């Protein structure tokens, strides 16, 4: 599996490492010139350990009004930040399980004023789905409409049910609880996310992958070092942890590069030929966080799921108010 990941699957149109690196140098010129060396472990590899903050106002996809504009001017960035903060403050969240004071999206774009986390394709947007991907999406919508939004707990999302946010969603900036903690030993890397307290254990010792028929919420990950970059390849997803319409053939390659004591560049490329006609890639910096990750206690505090189901039963009986 390492050979396919290192080559980054040109058969599926995955960008080469050189392309991604050149994009990063363009996107993060200040980081590329950082003087302070990144720390290393006692066994000689880069030390990625710590709590990392993923918050940012930069969206995953480039907003349509910016078309092919990869970066904003200072004036555009200031106006975008002002309008975004104003809109979030004015949003009516009465329909949401989250009060406004829970939300913590981040209040600024990245310093380079980029318009998306997506660095490939160049338009900064998820590729349109294949015919098969669109068919599956239409079938899911039809099934939800036929069942109703709250006939049972299984009609709600895996996130609402406190199972998982899935990959790569769990690594993307979140509306709140956006910390990620990394722990290392010579044989294992643990990537622990604050939201829904999910821990990925990534073997680094070359052990074989799980059998293809064994599927997991967060897939099956294996890691290795390429120079000073941690590479993590993940397969064996289920068809229930859907990411932008993906299926169980989703293939994901992540890269973690600590460029200085306070900054980690995170990248991933996802490939699923049944869903998208080409692979697409994301890259963004995350910074050291002040403070600790506390227990998320998702199941223990999940009153929203019970309330949604009980209200749906009340509506059916005509007693809802």
Image: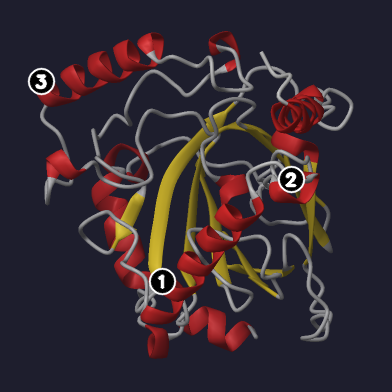
Q: CA distance from mark 1 to mark 3?
A: 38 Å
Colour scheme employed for the rendering of this structure: secondary structure
Please tell me how crowded label 2 is: few (under 14), some (14-19), or many (20+) other residues with Cα within 10 Å: some
Tell me which corner region of the image, top left, top right, bottom left or bottom right, holds residue 211: bottom right
Residue 243: where, in percent of width, then height?
54, 59
Q: Left of 40 or right of it: where is 189? A: right
Q: Which residue is mark 1?
A: 134
Q: Residue at x 66, y 13 (%)?
A: 321
Quadrant of the rendering where the N terminus is positioned: bottom right
Residue 307 or residue 7, whichever sits in front: 307
Q: Nearer the viewer, mark 1 or mark 3?
A: 1
197 on left or right of 145: right
Alpha-carbon neighbours of circle 3 within 10 Å: few (<14), some, or many (≥20)?
Answer: few
128 versus 304 height, above or below: below
Mark 2 highlights which residue?
A: 151
User: What number of labels is visible?
Assistant: 3
Left or right placement of residue 194 versus residue 127 in this view: right
Q: Which residue is mark 3?
A: 75
- Residue 5 lies, in percent from the top left, at 55, 79
Which-is-in-front pick, marks 2 and 3?
Answer: 2
Q: Residue 233: image x %, image y %? A: 63, 71
At a point 27% along the width and 64% down the height, the residue shown is 121
Q: Which of these two is toward me, 77 or 136?
A: 136
Structural distance between the alpha carbons of marks 2 and 1: 25 Å
Compare marks 2 and 3 and give the one earlier in the sequence.
3
């Amino acid at each position: 599996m390492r050979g396919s990941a290192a080559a980054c699957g040109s058969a599926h149109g995955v960008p080469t490492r050189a392309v991604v690196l050149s994009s990063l140098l363009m996107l993060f010129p200040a980081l590329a010139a950082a003087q302070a060396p990144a720390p290393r472990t006692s066994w000689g590899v880069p030390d990625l350990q710590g709590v990392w903050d993923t918050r940012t106002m930069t969206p995953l996809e480039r907003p349509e009004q910016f078309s092919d504009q990869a970066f904003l001017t200072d004036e555009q960035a200031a106006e975008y930040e002002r309008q975004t903060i104003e809109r979030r403050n004015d949003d009516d969240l009465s329909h949401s399980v989250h009060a406004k004071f829970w939300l913590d999206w981040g209040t600024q774009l990245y310093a380079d004023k980029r318009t998306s986390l997506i660095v490939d394709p160049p338009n900064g947007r998820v590729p349109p789905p294949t015919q098969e991907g669109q068919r599956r999406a239409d079938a899911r919508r039809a099934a939800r409409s036929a069942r109703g939004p709250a006939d049972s707990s299984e009609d709600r999302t895996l996130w609402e049910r406190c199972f998982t946010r899935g990959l790569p969603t769990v690594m993307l900036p979140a509306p709140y609880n956006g910390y990620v903690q990394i722990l290392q030993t010579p044989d294992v890397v643990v990537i622990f996310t604050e939201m829904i307290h999910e821990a990925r254990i990534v073997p680094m010792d070359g052990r074989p992958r799980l059998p293809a028929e064994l599927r997991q919420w967060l897939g099956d990950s294996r890691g290795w070092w390429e120079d000073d970059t941690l590479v993590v390849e993940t397969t064996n997803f289920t068809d229930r942890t859907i990411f932008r319409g993906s299926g169980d053939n989703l293939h994901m390659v992540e890269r973690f590069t600590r460029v200085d004591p306070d900054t980690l560049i995170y990248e991933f490329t996802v490939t699923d030929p049944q869903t998208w006609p080409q692979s697409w890639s994301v890259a963004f910096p995350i910074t050291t966080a002040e403070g600790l990750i506390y227990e998320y206690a998702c199941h223990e505090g999940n009153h929203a799921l019970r309330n949604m189901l009980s209200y749906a039963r009340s509506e059916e009986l005509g007693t809802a108010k």
